Image: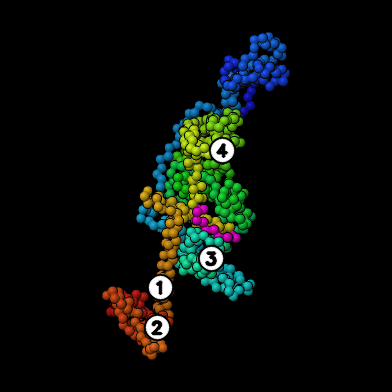
Amino acid sequence: MAHNLDENDILEALEEPTLDSGSEGEIDEIAEDPEFPPSDSSDSSSDESGNVPSQPAQQESSSSAVPQGRKRQRVSAEALRRIQCNADTGWSDEDNLPIIPVFEEESGVTASIDAASSPFECFELFFPPSIAKHIKVETNRYASSVIAKIRREKRVVKNSLWNSWQPVKMHEFYLFFSIVIHMCLVKKSKLREYWSTNKFVSTPYPSSVMSRNRFAAILSNLHVNDNATYISRGNENHDPLHKIRPYFDHLVEIFASSYAPSENLTIDEGVCGFRGRVHFRVYMKNKPEKYGIKLFIVCDAASGYVLKMEVYCGKGNADNSIMPLFQRLLQNYFDKGHTVYSDRFYTSPALFDFLWERKTKAVGTCMSNRKGLPKQTVIKRKLKKGETAYMRRKHLLCLKWRDTRDVLLLSTKHKMTSSLVQVRTKEGLLMKNKPDAILDYNVNKVGVDRSDQMIAYYPFKRRQLKWWKKLFFHMFTMAITNAYVLYRATRSKEQKKNLHLSDFMLKIGEGLLVKGTTLAKETCSTTISSNRLLGRHFAEKIPATENKSQPTRTCKVCADRGKASTGKVSRRETIWWCSCCGVALCMPDCFKLYHTKANYISYVND
């Protein structure tokens, strides 16, 4: 922090031996004094090196005209440096970096997956059956409450989605999300176009899985939490994220436990685009989605894996000042030797001092008006293109480098060293000398940007009036990208080359379809089995047809038992059937066996 110089500091500097008139760094303190008449232009002009030439001998006698107390004095460059260093107390140009914390932790996938795991198995880490079941229950709860309200108010419309609503089943839920992933990969402007029969724009997949009205009904009623437990805004214990709290908390927990990051971490903001009404919507001019919901995110710098996130819910909901925010985001990564990369919005000497105390290194660009910076020696110093100014305070390096504009950077990891690198310019490829701290920052600052980039490739962009649905599908896509990072981490270099995010999402969509179809068959089989064992059943003759007066069919019990024992279907014909079950059965043994034994195929008579 800069301090005012007292008279003793200035006099001590002025007592330094003056340099010769031809030396560099010479400053004439009376050059702008109005009491001194200007000298001839030939005497006062400087040489090409910028040095002030000495005055002619015949003018030395006129020095007696100078008033007492205003003697002409010169300050050396070394003395000037000492004045500036004294103004920036605690900072020095001695570049002695203390012993820095060493990162020795193991990094990589910690979840229960390996090289044999499929994309769908990786995805199920973040979207397990328990979460799917919870969302299904809350969706049915919400739909039931709305329908009950509509019926009480007698506002039921004959052909509305509410009038034809049926509770969503687990297999439908998986099929619903398989269509969501299909919509992420195949872009169309309107929802109904996915079920269009126009050959020019038709896509057969959605209509083969679920009707348009059923998909719209599930999407409209989709819910993640119970509205009955919501506490209104302004009351104690109000939770702004109540609508998505169960899924959000699950993701935060499983993100952190599934992956151990490398040494370098990135902290930055992410945005879930939303232009509707919500009191914590923000505007960020430098983001592709300028209006939306802001998230504070910490990522692994190399892979872009999201380790932890917080949603900005406006002022008064949480202490979002920089220090408490970093404490919450990095609580699992302190005292391990990690390096945190942040931008100018977060960086300050106070923050980097705090991180150093927790054995965490930090690198980041910085605003010039932060407290505790070396104002005189670095901030206010004018630099030409390619020049560098720096000062150090113990573990903290403050560096300013001039390129097309000034770049101010703080680091507790680097010394003031530079490297010659090749850069692309309008004139072609050129060699440029850049500080190593800036080169390192440019490589590792993009962790959150890499995550946002993957999410932006294939988002579920449908017009939503409810902010929490936008945020829910944003987190759903984030879970897919995190699963993609884990999947790649368990593969060899050769396998990674042709592994694209779109292919990975395609595999997840197929996995959801298979699981939904399998559950549908099990549900149907269970329902039929339950009906054939519990219902009332009567044997009837198979009704006559136009071609046959006494038609016959193959007995189901004989056919199934014969296939199980010999591998071939036994074609034993019968004229009897159960009209309730819709199957032909021999009388009376097969009829009785089918309606009394759950596993009639392997049943053996005593």
**Residue range (magenta):** 455-466
Q: Which mark is residue 193?
A: 3
**Label 2 is placed on what type of residue?**
Cys
Q: Which mark is residue 525?
A: 1
Q: Quadrant of the C terminus?
A: bottom left
Residue farthest bottom in this picture:
549
Crowd band around label 3 with a 10 angstrom C-alpha radius: few (<14), some (14–19), many (20+): some
What distance separates the C-alpha of mark 1 from that of mark 4?
Answer: 65 Å
Pointer 3 and pointer 4: residues touching (CB < 8 Å)? no
**Label 1 is placed on what type of residue?**
Ser
- Horizontal side of 52 relative to 500 (left or right) equals right
Please name the residue shown 47% across and 63% down the image: 178
> Horizontal and vertical percent for residue 24?
57, 20
Pointer 1 and pointer 4: residues touching (CB < 8 Å)? no
Q: Which residue is mark 4?
A: 366
Q: Nearer the viewer, mark 2 or mark 4?
A: 4
Pointer 3 and pointer 2: residues touching (CB < 8 Å)? no
N-terminal-most mark, 3 or 2 = 3
Q: Which mark is residue 578?
A: 2
